[in-house]
Amino acid sequence: MPEDAESRIEARRRLASRITGVDAARGIALLGMFVAHVAPAVESTQVAELIAIADDRPRLLFALTAGVGLGLLTGATRPRTTDRPELRRQVAIRAVILLMIGLLVIALLRPLVIVILDVYGIAFLVMVPLLFLPARAALTAGAVSLPVAPAVAALAERDPTVQAAASGDLGIVVEWFLTGSYPVIIWVPVMLIGLGLARLDVAAAATVRWYALVGILAAAVCLPLTASLPENQVLGADPALDWAIPARASLETVGNVGVGLGVLAGAIALTALAVTPVRRAASTLLSPITAMGAMPLTIYTGQLVVLSLSKRVGPGGVATDDSWGLLIGLVVGSMVFAWLWRRYVGRGPLEVLLRAASGRDRDGDPDGPEERSRGRRGADGGD
């Protein structure tokens, strides 16, 4: 076989595997959210610490893969030039739909967990004018703003003026951007880092090595430092320790994003860069998780429906939906559903509707050149 033909085949294989790795990382983030949402309280300190791993890291990994998905959607290493206004319009429509779904879920289902869909939609809207940033600009903007944003959010959350605004008529906007559990001010820098990785070729061996190293170093340095700082939760309670509030927030977020980079690098290394036997085994073993990650809107929204139907009155008359049985059911049920649906149908049902509503299926080339090269059934990361 000619060398150029072999190179093209290898490039197509790596591009398809790249999507597998990104979807696998996104699926791992969904599993982490399940644990954070449903795992009951335990007496064992060790088990409680393991469960606590799912508190912040899954949402940041989700934001990271969302940024990678936007980068792939807009051309990866070669940003598309001919249809940029149309792509921006499509992403903006998707963002508005996600926002509406999130608000409807909150109003109608009233789940006992924090819903991310509305904030996710707002973050996508913020990303619209940034979609075609080159790799260096996206990575620089994300890396510079990432340590600053959590500190600003932590201080804003404790500021009396911001607290008053959060309880006013525009309180939900303040929560979206500053004081909520998933503030956009933190999500956007992480998404910019993901966008920059896609521009560099997120599956290239050299790229994977450097962002894996960066992630490991960030986690190894920042997370122990976070644990060593005093937990001063009330601004002004001890003025001598007020500095620890923004410092802890920044160090913890940077460390957790480092963990996300490590997970993404590991998933891509196993499914794209490992030797063939390892790659095939990993892809097979991860296929249920990968299938979940290929239809995140369907799986996440389905989870909220299940949780809303599982609410009950717990000890002390407090409403709850926590249980090991529900957690196991969500994990196993989501994996089985996603694997079967993706194998025999294709895109997730809500992903199909979101794609159609944004007008992407009405394009002359519905999948786009970079998506067609990796197959109709590969997730484009933007759904």
Image: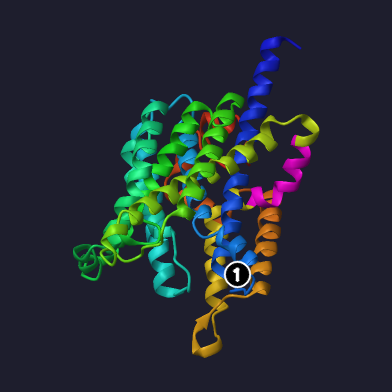
Residue 18 relative to residue 137: left or right = right
For the rendered model, the colour scheme is rainbow
- Residue 8 vertical position relative to residue 342 in the rendered view, above or below: above
Q: Residue placed at 61% from the left, 34% from the top?
A: 18
Residue 38 position within the rendered picture, expressed as x and y whole percent measured from the top left: 58, 70
Q: In this view, does 348 lie to the left or right of 281?
A: left
Residue 276 vs 94, above or below: the answer is above
Residue placed furthest toward the right: 277
Give the residues drawn in magenta, as a range.
279-291
Q: Is residue 215 magenta?
A: no
Q: Which x, y percent locates residue 330?
A: 64, 66
The residue tagged 1 is: 39
Q: Nearer the viewer, residue 262 or 241?
A: 241
Estimate the x, y position of residue 54 in percent, counting from the top left. 56, 59
Q: Is residue 381 visible?
A: no
Q: Is the magenta stretch mostly helix, strand or loop?
A: helix
Residue visible at 39% across and 36% down in the picture:
143
Between 379 and 222, which is closer to the camera in this rendering?
222
The picture quadrant where one finds residue 15 is top right
Secondary structure of residue under mark 1 = loop
Q: Which of 194/143 is in front?
A: 143
Direction from residue 107 to residue 356 in the image, left or right:
right
Give x and y (percent) for residue 358. 42, 47
